[in-house]
Amino acid sequence: VLGSAQIHQLFLLPKNSINLNASYGTVPKSVMQSLWALQLECEDDPQEWVLGGAVSHLRPVRDRLARLLHCDTPDLVLVENCTSAVNAVLRSLQPRRGAILVHLSTAYGVIKNCMAHVAANWGGRVVEVSVEFPGHGFPPCGSDGLPVAEAFGRALDRIRAEGGEVALACLDHIASCPGVKMPVEALVACCASRGVPCFVDGAHVLGQLEVNLTELQRLGLTYWASDAHKWLFCPKGTAVLWVAKHAQARIVPAALGAVVCSSTSSSSFRPETVAGLSDFELRFQYTGTRDYAPFCAIAAALDFRELLGGEREVVEHNHRMALWAQRYLAELWNTEVLVPDENTCAMAHVRLPVSTKSAADALLRMLKEQHNIRVMHFTVPPSTRSPYGQRTLRRRRSTYWIRPCLQIFVTREDVKVVGEVVLALAPLAAVVEAGEKWVKKVRPYKSCVGGSMLRETFTSDMIIPQVPSEQNLASLDSMSKSFENMALFGNMERIVEVSNSPDSVLMPCGESWSLGSSRVIKLIN
């Protein structure tokens, strides 16, 4: 049963851990065993493997992936990751000098870096179109409060009105963090209607969302890439690049290889393994000496998914889990869900019950170090305008969120555990934050022996919030270690006492100031 403890046993995940992070994927035991067998097969006769054995596996793998993505096999090639894919596309462009590249602000850092590099090479520039997240279950929008596709279209129109030429637009299919499904169909059509070629970064798509590339091509898609290791259960170093037929002639891999390795026939691929491949396919067939076993093991990952009930069963299960998880956590924490259901795939987005970045960072450290819970967190900055014309949606300050990835091995009980642990640790995270502020404030006085000068550094923002339950006290040892790591005065930062005294602030030398009704945490020299 998907989402059960039995599924957890099919992976190499440690016991008593909760893995809610899909950035680098999780490979099932059966797929790892297939990978290891393929690698051993290679070592038995490396030359025969590279020139024949591996190649014989690759075409069937590409055929299966093409059926999964509803596209033609000759248009789909294997690459190591989306980084390789975007480098292949961007470095193959030959625009006129001064041409412009455009991307959404949600673009992955690799995309932004690569665009900046290639644009500088031809004297061009990069334009970023801002995407904002109003939260409260509303979809993302442009900085002007308009829907994302409309805001993107206006940006392209402004560039053209100023005499600029857009060489390529980069769009997110599912953004990274937050992992929100973007309106990719509308964005692709927006580019096509203006004659702008587009690259869609689908790094998180394979295995998380069913895709029809033929339909996207009809709308005007030029390039599309996705990692297979994140959600499809494939080994690391597996991804796909799809290129529309009319654009294939100019696209070469980031590392350009060859079909003929040398001038001798004994160092060339067996003819039957490459027969019938197009020039585009051949360019990506061999990119130098490397481990081709992960590509071949994609077949085992697809077999594993079929045993689970098929692609649709896996995708729909994870989607249902994500919707339930974000609603459950938002209600438990009395916070909110970031985006509506139609923008959610298998990554949930819930606002944390903390109000500062330092507290959010401290909370995530404690989740990992004390409870073996791994999850991504991110910041949503303040809004620039009122999205969708609603003033109540405009954020005046930053908010802090988590992105739980709901893979098939995550159970509802896992989500409930995360909910309760976060609820218990949130006040303590604020205490850690207060300690960090204290250290920063007293740093100028680190040569001071007594406490009189230190007391002058305290302000009202050092108030410790209410600690609601006795179970929180078990975490204080870990918190005290955090303080010790920041020590400037020997053991002065060590927490030594928690009582039910009136409100207080963190104070050196065992002193405290009475301010209200939460616990006192004393620090002594």
Image: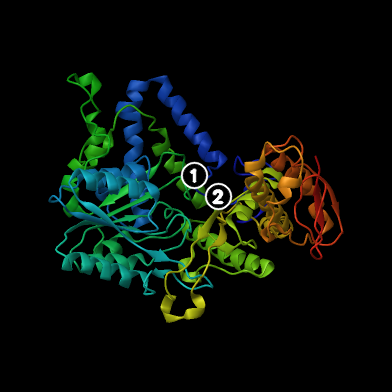
Q: Where residue 152 appears, x then y in whole percent?
A: 30, 67
Res 84 quadrant in image: top left
> Disc 1 marks which residue?
24
Label drawn at residue 350: none
- Confirm whether residue 63 shows in the render: no
Say which amino acid is labelled 2: Asn
Residue 223 vs residue 33, the one in the foreground: 223
Crowding at dot 2, Cα within 10 Å, few <14 / some 14-19 / many 20+, comes out as many
Q: Which residue is rendered at x = 31% and y = 41% of the image?
A: 59
Q: Where residue 240 appears, x then y in whole percent?
A: 34, 47
Residue 512 vs residue 101, the one in the foreground: 512
CA gap between label 2 and label 1 equals 8 Å
Residue 194 in the image: above or below residue 112:
below
CB contact under 8 Å: marks 2 and 1: yes
For this orientation, the residue located farthest to the front is: 452
> Disc 2 marks which residue?
21
For this orientation, the residue located farthest to the right is: 500
Q: Where residue 317 appears, x then y in whole percent?
A: 55, 61
Q: Which residue is rendered at x = 42% and y = 81% of the image?
A: 389
Which type of secondary structure does the marked residue at label 1 adopt?
loop
**Left or right of residue 492: residue 158:** left
Res 172 quadrant in image: bottom left
Q: Can you say which quadrant of the picture contains the C terminus?
A: top right
Q: Where residue 94 appears, x then y in whole percent?
A: 15, 47
Residue 157 in the image: above or below residue 127:
below
Say which amino acid is labelled 1: Tyr
